[in-house]
Amino acid sequence: MRTRNRASAFLLALACAGAAQAQSLYREDSWRPLTADNKAFRPGDVLTVQVFENSSATTSADTGTRRNNHISGALAHGSNVAAQASLAVGGDFDGGGRTQRTNRLLTIVSVTVQEVLPGGQLRIAGTQSVTVNDEVQTVTLEGVVRPVDISDGNVVQSTRIAAARITYLGEGGVSDRSRRPWWRQLLDFVGF
């Protein structure tokens, strides 16, 4: 009976051992050769973006119009003038305007690869928030990067990002005071 129990236990242990499967230490989705660059190439990888954006625009317009109308009439009977009327209408308009705008944004943002597109490009997105003196400054960046534009240090410049959307927002007392008040916006809308 004892040998039968030992044999049953041995067969049971063998059956359990046969059910266990060996797993490889090699994972194809995360393997990287020893000589490969440390660049982002798959979803979840982190990429550093150097944002150097400069934009400048100037618009000017001048308008001038002049209008003068004069109507006069007289009613006379012989040498006596019975009635005389005159109407003169005139108007001048000179208008002009100039708009000049310059923007500059210099920052470094770490983003993550969201998706590898069919052509091999990487869709990236990330947000960075910094609080200075109770002012929250938030930079949001989205776009598409070609792997060849990523440097050996895993850095890409913002000028190399296709379909880039870079948003820079400030929240706090200084930002609130720099916005036009609602009543000024209403007067501008009405035309005053």
Image: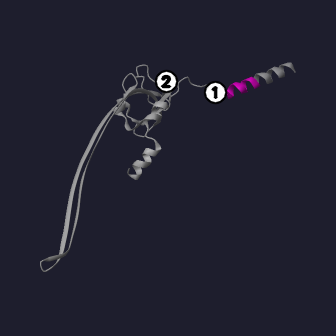
Where does label 2 land, which residue?
133
Q: Residue at x 53, y 24 (%)?
A: 26
Q: Amino acid under label 2?
A: Asn
**Residue placed farthest to the front in the image?**
80
Q: Residues within 10 Å of mark 2 (few under 14, many from 20)?
A: few
Residue 143 falls inside the magenta stretch: no
Q: Position of residue 168 (x, y in %)?
A: 43, 34
What is the magenta range? 12-20
Q: Is residue 78 above or below residue 65?
A: below
The answer to whether marks 2 and 1 mark residues whose Cβ atoms lie closer than 8 Å is no
Q: Position of residue 182 (x, y in %)?
A: 47, 44
Residue 18 falls inside the magenta stretch: yes
Q: Residue at x 86, y 19 (%)?
A: 2
Q: Secondary structure at mark 2?
A: loop
Of 96 and 73, which appears nearest the observer?
73
Where does label 1 land, which residue?
21
Pair 2/1: label in front = 2
Which mark identifies residue 2?
none
Q: Main secondary structure of the magenta part?
A: helix
Q: Is residue 29 above or below residue 83?
A: above
Colour mode of the rendering:
one colour
* Residue 169 visible somewhere in the drawing: no
Q: Residues within 10 Å of mark 1 (few under 14, many from 20)?
A: few
Q: Position of residue 17 (x, y in %)?
A: 69, 24
Mark 2–mark 1 Cα distance, whole angstroms, equals 58 Å
Q: Secondary structure at mark 1?
A: loop
Instruction: Identify the mark nearer the N-term, 2 or 1.
Output: 1
Quadrant in the picture for residue 38: top left
Of 67 and 36, which appears nearest the observer?
67
Classify residue 52 as left or right of residue 117.
Answer: left
